[in-house]
Image (cartoon, rainbow, N blue to C red):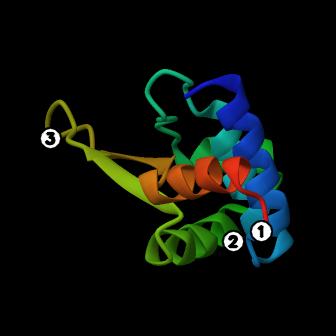
Amino acid sequence: MSSKTRLALWDYISRRQNLPASAKILLLVAANYTDPRTGRANLPISLFVRDGDVEESDVRRYIVRLETSNRLSKLILPGDDISRPPSTLFNLSPQLILSAQQWARNPE
């Protein structure tokens, strides 16, 4: 993913996604952290809270909706031992990234 793709994500999320402002902010936070080479950000909920300036309970609620609508994907990493619970990380979905790239080539 190039810098053009990151700009396409911002444009697509801002203009084409019919979502509440807080949900769009969460997607934009994920777009900011998405690695240009891998298309992944691996964000914990705490980063969404900090960078999106959204309450954790709201972040959790929006993340469920964004996962259900295939805008975010979840990655669960197992803990190292019993004392460390699994970590849940989030990324923009491949479908959202592809849609943004296609829209950037042929905006309506």
**Secondary structure of the residue carrying numbered label 3:** loop
Residue 39 x %, y %: 48, 34
Mark 3 crowd level (few <14, some 14–19, many ≥20, 10 Å Cα): few
Mark 1 and mark 3 lie on one chain; the one further toward the N terminus is 1
Residue at position x 84%, y 64% in the image: 15
- Residue marked by disc 2: 58
Residue at position x 75%, y 77% in the image: 19
From the viewer's perspective, is 84 left or right of 57? left
Residue 42 x %, y %: 46, 37
- Residue marked by disc 3: 82
Mark number, residue 97: none
Q: Nearer the viewer, residue 107 or 40?
A: 107
Q: Nearer the viewer, residue 1 or 81?
A: 1
Image depth: mark 2 or mark 1 in front? 1
Q: Amino acid at mark 2?
A: Asp
Quadrant location of the C terminus? bottom right
Mark 2 and mark 3 lie on one chain; the one further toward the N terminus is 2
Residue at position x 50%, y 77% in the image: 69
Q: Amino acid at mark 1?
A: Arg
**Secondary structure of the residue carrying numbered label 1:** helix
Image mark count: 3
Q: Is residue 19 above or below residue 60?
A: below
Q: Amino acid at mark 3?
A: Ile
Q: Are marks 1 and 3 in contact (CB under 8 Å)?
A: no
Quote the CA–CA distance across marks 2 and 1. 22 Å
Mark number, residue 16: 1
Mark 2 crowd level (few <14, some 14–19, many ≥20, 10 Å Cα): few
Q: Is residue 101 above or below residue 65?
A: above
